Image (cartoon, rainbow, N blue to C red):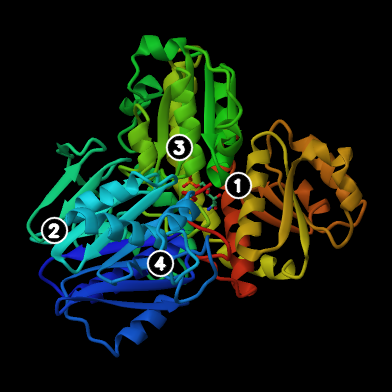
């Protein structure tokens, strides 16, 4: 997904912009460019491929300017070419802009600008020409941007500079995030906080329909009615140490290893052992309201949906109320039935996933209580829900989500404790769960210590072209998540099924060329799962089992075994998923994949 960074202050803009683009690389891109105001002119340099290509090109033109904008492009409209790379500019090249989002009516706008010379195939470029037209009419950059944006259908996060307004950046958002960093006599604009944190932790989050006019000394923010408004300055706790690789080969591996420590961050200060409960104040409901919730719905996409599926199982076991997990892109168009005591949780690492955002807007529209289980502080979904809980996983930069998944589940367990103890869950049961939770980080560490063994196992399987992941009960969402991890970073096809589904069709595919990977830990469904694997073994399918420590009988069945510590059934996904994360990671490295930025994928899907 595209990235934006802008700077206005006393320092040379170019190095700040290039460093900012490098912090945005994790979002996935295929070209990059920047525009800096220099000697009264705006100079624009673009290059396809990696940021290094742009940096090398810039060596030939040492730009001294202290105001600039930059962009990493992930191609949507138009191929990967220099002409399609942002920044885009007006006919007279006096106005330059960078844009995230989609201009749905760009063809109509283009046709309404006869005589304008368009040089790219992109939708974004029409905005530069529309602003140029409006600027010629009124000579005020912010007003020109407002009038141009009022003619747009679609989504945007933009930053605009103009030669005739030398010390100014205009930025605006609708559906595509824009954050503003407040420094000492300098300001930063970006599509997320990551590139800003090395300079300042004081952040202002623009909301949809808002526009900001930024000079070296001042920032003014206006709402959709063009009224100046005051926005809170938030302090982001993440530091740029937590955004580096810290010696790991990839962000993904670092984030897999972050899990024990960030898990502790997720539960710290949120449990009360003596009462066997959790205290998540962000729920913004009193005990009466919580007791009267009669239905819970988790709404999410991808890995977050798999966490939501775990949440469904956990809520039904601990709280005994009907609970479901829904894929946001389906839910948003399903005309859902919402009761007056329905609680909807939006589950999202980025807090910007457009389908999840649209789905909770629909749920709110129909009267649900809507709360967030989110990682990125101040993100759009976090600000559009009426409360919720941050998962404290820290910046997750690898496209493949790992630590956010386990921390989402941690928060779901805390919510289930909090709600369950207001109903039938006893204090002893609550205390048992809390004690088991407190053991999880150490148990995660024992699994992480097996990384080399898992690497060796993954090399045995690297030439297979298809996999099944099979699990029952809480191990079914584990199988789904393991399958997604493998697909998205190794590009190998895999499917996840509930173990009992094999007989209903998929078993026809089983052969010695079709391995089965199965989380089959000791729980009430162990024997059932074992018989499913026996059916696969009878058809010579290679089997990799994720099994409970000291399970000897699994050795008769599995070709390879990764052992995990015993924990409560409801906590098993927290442990059983980690071997599958490492299996996919090592396989991807062996296959030479771009592990942190897999092809075709973006870290946050903010366009439909
Ligand atoms: C997971 O590895 C993927 N990167 C993807 O499925 C992701 O979980 C999904 O896009 C949801 O993102 P979110 O948690 O930021 O909403």
Q: Are marks 3 and 1 in contact (CB under 8 Å)?
A: no
Q: What residue is shown with label 2?
A: 183
Pair 2/1: label in front: 2
Left or right: where 296 falls relative to 515: left
Q: Secondary structure at mark 1?
A: helix
Q: What residue is shown with label 4?
A: 72
Q: Residue at x 92, y 51 (%)?
A: 538
* Label of residue 357 in the image: 3
> How far apart in space, not on screen, are marks 2 and 3 (Cα)?
30 Å
Q: Residue at x 87, y 38 (%)?
A: 504
Label 4 vs 3, first from the N-terminus: 4
> How far apart in space, not on screen, are marks 2 and 1 (Cα)?
44 Å
Label 4 vs 1, first from the N-terminus: 4
> Could you say where residue 464 lies in the image, as x and y percent from the top left?
78, 66
Q: What residue is shown with label 1?
A: 576
Residue 407 image-quadrant placement: top left
Label 4 vs 2, first from the N-terminus: 4
Q: Are marks 2 and 1 in contact (CB under 8 Å)?
A: no
**Residue 473 higher or lower than 256, as above or below:** above
Left or right: where 217 falls relative to 246: left
**Residue 343 higher or lower than 36, as above or below:** above
* Label of residue 139 in the image: none
Label 2 vs 1, first from the N-terminus: 2
């Amino acid at each position: 997904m595209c990235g934006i960074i802008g700077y206005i202050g006393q320092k040379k803009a170019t190095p700040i912009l290039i460093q900012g683009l490098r912090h945005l690389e994790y979002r996935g891109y295929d070209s990059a460019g920047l525009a800096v105001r220099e000697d009264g002119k705006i100079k624009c340099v673009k290059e396809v491929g990696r940021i290094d290509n742009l940096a090398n090109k810039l060596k030939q033109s040492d730009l001294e300017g202290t105001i600039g904008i930059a962009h990493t492009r992930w191609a949507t409209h138009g191929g990967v070419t220099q002409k399609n790379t942002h920044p885009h500019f007006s006919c007279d090249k006096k106005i330059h802009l960078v844009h995230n989002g989609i201009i749905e009516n760009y063809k109509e706008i283009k046709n309404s600008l006869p005589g304008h010379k368009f040089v790219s195939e992109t939708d974004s470029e029409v905005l530069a020409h529309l602003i140029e037209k409006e600027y010629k009419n009124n000579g005020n950059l912010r007003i020109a941007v407002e009038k141009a944006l009022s003619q747009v259908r679609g989504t945007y996060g933009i930053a605009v500079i103009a030669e005739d307004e030398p010390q100014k950046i205009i930025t605006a958002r609708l559906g595509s995030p824009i954050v503003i960093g407040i420094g000492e006599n300098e300001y930063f604009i970006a599509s997320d906080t990551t590139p800003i944190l090395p300079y300042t932790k004081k952040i202002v989050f623009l909301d949809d329909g808002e526009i900001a006019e930024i000079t070296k000394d001042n920032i003014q923010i206006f709402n959709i009615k063009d009224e100046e408004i005051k926005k809170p300055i938030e302090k982001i706790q993440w530091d740029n140490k937590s955004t580096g690789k810290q010696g790991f080969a990839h962000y993904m591996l670092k984030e897999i290893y972050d899990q024990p420590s960030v898990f502790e961050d997720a539960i710290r200060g949120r449990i009360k052992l003596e009462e066997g409960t959790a205290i998540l104040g962000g729920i913004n409901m009193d005990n009466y309201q919580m007791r009267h919730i009669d239905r819970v719905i988790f709404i999410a996409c991808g890995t977050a949906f798999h966490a939501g599926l775990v949440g469904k199982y956990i809520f039904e076991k601990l709280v005994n109320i009907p609970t479901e997990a829904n894929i946001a892109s389906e839910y948003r168009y399903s005309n859902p039935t919402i009761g007056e005591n329905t609680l909807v949780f939006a589950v999202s690492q980025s807090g910007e996933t457009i389908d999840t955002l649209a789905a909770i807007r629909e749920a709110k529209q129909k009267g649900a209580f809507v709360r967030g289980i989110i990682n990125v502080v101040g993100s759009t979904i976090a600000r559009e829900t009426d409360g919720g809980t941050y998962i404290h996983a820290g910046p997750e930069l690898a496209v493949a989500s790992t630590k956010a998944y386990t921390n989402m589940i941690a928060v779901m367990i805390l919510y289930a404790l909090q709600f369950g103890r207001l109903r039938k869950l006893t204090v002893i049961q609550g205390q048992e769960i809390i004690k088991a939770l407190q053991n999880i980080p150490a148990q995660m560490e024992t699994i992480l210590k097996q990384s080399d063994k898992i690497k060796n196992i993954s090399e045995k399987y690297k030439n297979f072209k298809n996999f099944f992941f099979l699990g029952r009960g809480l191990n079914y969402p584990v199988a789904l998540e393991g399958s997604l991890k493998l697909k998205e970073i190794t590009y190998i096809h895999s499917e996840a099924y509930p173990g009992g589904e094999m007989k209903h069709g998929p078993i026809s595919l089983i052969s010695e060329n079709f391995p089965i990977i199965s989380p089959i830990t000791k729980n009430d469904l162990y024997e059932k799962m074992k018989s499913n694997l026996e059916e696969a073994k009878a058809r010579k399918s290679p089997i990799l089992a994720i099994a409970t420590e000291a399970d000897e009988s699994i050795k008769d069945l599995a070709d390879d075994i990764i052992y995990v510590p015993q924990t409560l059934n409801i906590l098993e996904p927290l442990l059983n998923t980690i071997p599958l994360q490492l299996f996919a990671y090592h396989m991807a490295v062996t296959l030479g994949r771009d592990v942190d930025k897999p092809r075709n994928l973006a870290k946050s899907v903010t366009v439909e």
